[in-house]
Every structure is written in C-alpha cells, then in structure tokens.
Image: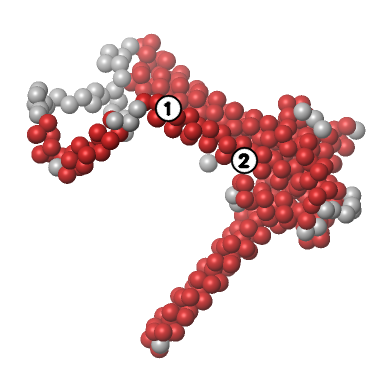
C-alpha cells in the first residue's frame, strides 16, 4: 500500500498542484476564589471630578479626550455599515477557504483514484470532473465546524452554570449537588467530545471519498463513512497513526535540516567574525538567500508531496474497506 502510494506521489506530478492548493487553503497537513465576592470594600470616593481623573490618568486621559469626540461624532449607521461589511468579509473569506479546500481535496481524491487505475492525468480533465463535487464536499466540511460550535456552546453553558452557582452567597445542599453534577458532566463531556471527534475525523476521510467517487450527498456520505469506521475501527486508527507519525517524521526531519544549516551558519559566523567582519556580512546574506527559497518553495512542496502520499494511502484503504463492507 505504501510503496504504491509513493510511486503515485512521485510519478503523477499533476497531483502536486492539488496538494499545494491544499497547503495554501489549510496550512501544514489539542483564579477562582471559591465564591468570594470581588467587590471593593475600601474607602471609595463618592464624587470624583473629571479634573481629578485627568490628574490620575495623565496623558492617556488627555489622548482619550482628543479621540473620544471623533468617535462620538460618527453616526450610528456608520458603525452598522462597518459591522455588516466585516460580517460579509468573514463570510467571503470563509467561502473562499471552504471552496478552495474542497476543490483541492476533490482533485486529490479523484486524481489519485485515476492514478490507481493507471490512467493519464491532466489538470483540466480533473478540474472538469470534480466541478460538481466541490459544493457537496464544502457542505460536508461544514458539519464538523457546526458540531464544534455546538460543543463549545454547551461547554460555555456549563461554565456559566458553575460560575453562577459559585457566585451565590448562601450555598445549599441542592446547589452543591448541581455543582458536582455539572463538574462530572463537564469532565465526561470532554472525553465524549474527544471520542466523537476521533470518530468524526475518521468518518470524514471516507465520507469525502464517498462524495467524490460515489456521488453521495454529504449526510449520506457521513453516515456511510461512520458505518465503515465501525466495521474497521482499530485498523483505521492504526492507519491514521502511521500516517500521522510519517508526517511528524517528515516535519521533524525538515526542522532538523533547518537547525543544521543554522548551526553551520552560526559557527561559520563566529569564525569569520574574528577573521574578517566583511565576510560575516556575506555569510549572513548567503544564509538569507538560502532560507527564503527554502521556506517559499521546499516547505510547501514537501507538504504537497505528503498530502498526495496520504491521499493515495487512504484511497487504497477506502477501496479495500468498501469491498469488505459490500462483500
């Protein structure tokens, strides 16, 4: 499986474009006072004049006096328009992210599937093939985000309950029981959430292929992907761990190479500093000229190759799981 994945990664360089796009749109592929009242109980001035406040705050207050009227004179509808524009900008950037990532994922999956069948690949042909898959794949990618938002809202609600209970001045046995239950529910919820996201991540791997290769809807693909994972759970976990370890090793190797280069430049800089200071400047410029292409070319390219390799591995795993499931 891995030797075939590496052969596809090296021989089908068209797939590197989709891996690079995936890198561009996604980046490189985890004091409470125990109910104390915190209000100030000391001597507090009842009527503090504006002049006294200026004497305390100094220049910052004077700057606030200068800037304050500027914002105060801006009409409310300007703030409303700016808020709407900011909201629309977030939607636009989010749409670009999801559509771009869906296109890259669909291209990798479809292209790798064709490569496994030893077909010739072209960027235009793959792009035309996956055009109808981008929208359902983008919608599929939204599901984990919605689950995450709902989970964070539930955790925030539990925190709110706990904070509200601890703020009560006269606790009772009922409040204590509710507080203990809330803490237990919070801890249990964390473990459940971790398990759910493990299952969801693995299900998404197969669901993406069901959308691209088998034309399933996002919900149907996710349900079918989950049924695949239930049947091959430990095998999928092991495969995911191997792919993750491989990725970490590659990234670690890249950073080790960076440290070696920086170490050589550092030692060279120490030697040249005592021999010729002008040579030190040349060495620093040379290091910059080497580092810039490395981070702008080699790092994205390495990530692209890793994405293609992992996609080829998971495509083969999907085919075998599908045969087992249908058989």
Scheme by which the image is coloured: secondary structure
Q: Position of residue 109 (x, y in %)?
A: 77, 45
Judged from the image, the secondary structure of the residue bearing numbered disc 2 is: helix
Residue 314 makes an appearance in the image: no
Q: Number of callouts in the render?
A: 2
Does residue 269 lie above or below 301 as drawn?
A: below
* Residue to which mark 1 is pinned: 80
Does residue 141 lie above or below 43 as drawn?
A: below
Which residue is located at x 78 percent, y 56 percent? 14
Q: Position of residue 226 (x, y in %)?
A: 73, 30
* Residue to which mark 2 is pinned: 96
Mark positioned earlier in the residue sequence (1 or 2): 1
Residue 68 or residue 44, whichever sits in front = 68
Q: Position of residue 149 (x, y in %)?
A: 54, 28
Left or right of 197? Residue 155 is left
Density class for disc 1 (Cα within 10 Å; few <14, some 14-19, many ≥20) is few
Tell me the tag on residue 271. none
Which residue is located at x 13 percent, y 34 percent? 53
Judged from the image, the secondary structure of the residue bearing numbered disc 1 is: helix
Left or right of 309? Residue 164 is left
Residue 224 or residue 127, whichever sits in front = 127
Which residue is located at x 31 percent, y 19 percent? 167
Does residue 71 lie above or below 262 as drawn?
A: above
Q: Position of residue 116 (x, y in %)?
A: 86, 50
């Amino acid at each position: 499986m891995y030797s075939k994945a590496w052969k596809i990664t090296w021989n089908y360089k068209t797939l590197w474009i989709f891996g690079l796009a995936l890198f561009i749109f996604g980046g490189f592929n985890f004091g409470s006072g125990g109910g104390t009242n915190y209000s100030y109980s000391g001597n507090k001035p009842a009527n503090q004049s504006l002049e006294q406040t200026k004497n305390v705050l100094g220049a910052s207050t004077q700057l606030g006096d200068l800037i304050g009227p500027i914002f105060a004179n801006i009409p409310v509808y300007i703030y409303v328009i700016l808020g709407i524009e900011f909201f629309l900008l977030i939607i636009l950037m989010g749409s670009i992210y999801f559509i771009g990532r869906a296109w890259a994922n669909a291209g990798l999956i479809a292209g790798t599937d064709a490569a496994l069948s030893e077909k010739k690949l072209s960027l235009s042909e793959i792009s035309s093939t996956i055009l109808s898959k981008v929208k359902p794949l983008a919608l599929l990618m939204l599901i984990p985000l919605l689950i995450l938002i709902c989970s964070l809202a539930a955790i925030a609600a539990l925190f709110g309950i706990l904070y509200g209970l601890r703020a009560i001045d006269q606790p009772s046995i009922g409040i204590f029981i509710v507080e203990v239950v809330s803490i237990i529910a919070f801890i249990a919820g964390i473990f459940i959430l971790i398990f759910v996201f493990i299952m969801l991540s693995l299900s998404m791997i197969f669901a993406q292929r069901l959308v691209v290769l088998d034309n399933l809807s996002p919900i149907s693909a996710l349900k079918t992907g989950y049924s695949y994972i239930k049947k091959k759970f430990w095998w999928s976990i092991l495969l995911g761990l191997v792919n993750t370890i491989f990725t970490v090793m590659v990234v670690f190797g890249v950073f080790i190479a960076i440290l070696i280069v920086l170490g050589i430049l550092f030692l060279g800089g120490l030697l040249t500093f005592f021999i010729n200071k002008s040579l030190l400047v040349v060495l620093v410029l040379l290091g910059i000229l080497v580092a810039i292409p490395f981070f702008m070319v080699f790092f994205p390219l390495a990530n692209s190759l890793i994405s293609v390799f992992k996609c080829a591995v998971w495509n083969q795993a999907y085919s075998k799981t599908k045969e087992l499931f249908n058989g």
